[in-house]
Image (spheres, rainbow, N blue to C red):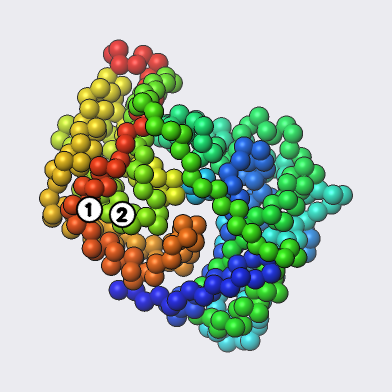
């Protein structure tokens, strides 16, 4: 069982600092997370920003200069992305730095790396009241291609369309990668204006993990991450669900050979709830692993699907089923998937399956927490839900799950939307 030192959390000037000393890692990981409520207005600007910011700073005015500065610090890695956690839009900036304790010379690598990190966040390249126009235009093109290419990846596209229909009047339906119709209005100045508001208002959390000395890290973090604002106010947007409604079935036609049957359920369980651990075990038995009911019954036994699996969204309380089926097999595949859920509700699974799923969930958790970034994600999940559980207890709670707990979880789950992306001919062949 892995040992994790206790996380120390400090409320600071304009940010919250999380320090986790651990001798397990040879590098030091620094992650900054900026969180705001998911909103249609500004969502495309927000999708663009991680890529624009990591291309140039005032001190490193082009991509080559910034890359070279990172490479000179023993190949320090830097990456960023945006994602939604429940009804919130989170931008993550990640840096991995060699631990200077392992170097023969006494160069202050960490301080130099943090200076670059701070520059990316707070001192981006600005000219005449806006970002570098060439960088903004290039990143707009890249994002435009990314948005257009979603339609080519039919599995991602079907998943997006399922959420569009399922969460129609909820912020969670918003596309975290932005919208093509917003592009004409975005320029170097308007994007910089959005950035200024974001850097001023967003909730900022900074995580530092590695073989580090806590007080020294606190001092460095204060030097590089403090914001002039006096408080770091939480702007959390609670998950909302439009009221109970009848099951929605949507069939859309595209030029596809393989139909995509995606089904959305409401779990009524979120990260931080007592039965969340039982939900993890439930998902393992239902569709989370290759030994699951969906895989064995829809794919193996009836040969109806090219793939069949499920996953859940921890902060929104959704369970999503994905399957690729022949258009003519829609009705049969749908029936068998829905039957697997009924089997879960009636307890048609063994204690051995519960144990097997439990071990697989625990292995997955341990694997995640073996990596600094994975561990940071687990800690950030907890912070978002307002529930703090030490790593050891997470594993213990999963181990305590019994068959009756899994049945109780199944009973709470409600079918919401059946979405089928099929060929133009439908199932007429």
Q: Residue at x 33, y 54 (%)?
A: 276
Pick the residue in front: 117 or 250.
Answer: 250
The answer to whether 396 is drawn above or below residue 89 in the figure is: below
Pick the residue in front: 192 or 243.
Answer: 243
Residue 360: x and y, percent? 26, 58
Residue 325 falls left or right of residue 7? left
Image quadrant where residue 187 sits: top right
The answer to whether 33 is drawn above or below residue 152 in the figure is: below
Q: Earlier in the sequence, mark 1 or mark 2?
A: 2
Pick the residue in front: 14 or 101.
Answer: 14
Residue contact at pointers 1 and 2, CB within 8 angstroms? yes
Identify the image quadrant of the N terminus. Answer: bottom left
Instruction: Classify mark 2: helix, strand or loop.
Output: loop
Residue matched to label 1: 405
Residue 344: x and y, percent? 20, 42
Residue 201 falls left or right of residue 263? right
Residue 155: x and y, percent? 41, 35
Q: Residue at x 30, y 16 (%)?
A: 427
Pick the residue in front: 178 or 90.
Answer: 90
Image quadrant where residue 153 sits: top left
Residue matched to label 2: 275
Residue 412: x and y, percent? 29, 42
Residue 230 falls left or right of residue 364? right
The answer to whether 271 is drawn above or below residue 231 in the figure is: above
* Residue farthest toward the front in the current orientation of the protein: 243
Dot 2 crowding, Cα within 10 Å, few <14, some 14–19, many 20+: some
Distance Cα–Cα, label 1 vs label 2 = 7 Å
Q: Is residue 402 visible?
A: yes
Q: Residue at x 75, y 61 (%)?
A: 123
Instruction: Classify mark 1: helix, strand or loop.
Output: helix
């Amino acid at each position: 069982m892995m040992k994790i030192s206790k996380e120390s959390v400090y409320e600071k000037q304009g940010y919250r600092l999380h320090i986790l000393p651990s001798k397990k890692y040879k590098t030091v990981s620094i992650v900054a997370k900026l969180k705001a409520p998911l909103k249609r207005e500004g969502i495309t600007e927000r999708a663009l920003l991680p890529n624009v910011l990591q291309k140039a700073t005032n001190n490193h005015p082009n991509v080559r200069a910034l890359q070279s500065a990172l490479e000179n610090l023993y190949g320090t890695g830097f990456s960023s992305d945006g994602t939604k956690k429940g009804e919130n839009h989170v931008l993550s900036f990640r840096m991995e730095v060699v631990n200077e304790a392992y170097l023969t010379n006494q160069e202050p690598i960490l301080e130099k790396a943090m200076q670059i990190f701070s520059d990316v966040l707070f001192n981006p390249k600005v000219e005449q009241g806006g970002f570098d126009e060439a960088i903004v235009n290039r990143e707009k093109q890249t994002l435009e291609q990314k948005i257009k290419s979603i339609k080519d990846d039919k599995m991602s596209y079907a998943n997006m369309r399922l959420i569009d229909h399922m969460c129609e009047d909820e912020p969670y339906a918003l596309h975290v990668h932005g919208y093509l119709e917003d592009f004409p209005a975005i320029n170097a100045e308007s994007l910089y204006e959005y950035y200024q508001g974001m850097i001023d208002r967003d909730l900022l959390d900074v995580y530092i993990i590695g073989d580090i000395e806590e007080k020294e890290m606190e001092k460095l973090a204060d030097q590089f991450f403090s914001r002039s604002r006096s408080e770091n106010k939480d702007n959390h947007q609670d998950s909302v669900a439009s009221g109970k409604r009848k099951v929605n079935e949507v069939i859309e036609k595209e030029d596809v050979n393989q139909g995509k049957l995606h089904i959305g359920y409401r779990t009524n369980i979120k990260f931080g709830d007592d039965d969340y651990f039982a939900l993890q075990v439930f998902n393992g038995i239902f569709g989370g692993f290759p030994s699951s009911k969906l895989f064995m019954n829809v794919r193996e036994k009836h040969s109806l699907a090219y793939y069949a699996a499920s996953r859940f969204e921890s902060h929104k309380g959704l369970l999503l089923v994905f399957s690729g089926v022949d258009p003519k097999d829609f009705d049969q595949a749908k029936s068998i998937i829905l039957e697997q859920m009924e089997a879960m509700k009636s307890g048609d699974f063994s204690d051995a399956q519960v144990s097997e799923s439990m071990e697989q969930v625990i292995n997955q958790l341990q694997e995640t927490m073996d990596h600094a970034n994975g561990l940071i994600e687990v800690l950030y999940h907890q912070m978002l839900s307002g529930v703090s559980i030490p790593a050891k207890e997470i594993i213990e709670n999963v181990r305590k799950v019994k068959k009756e707990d899994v049945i109780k979880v199944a009973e709470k789950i409600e079918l919401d939307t059946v979405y089928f992306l099929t060929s133009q001919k439908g199932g007429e062949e």
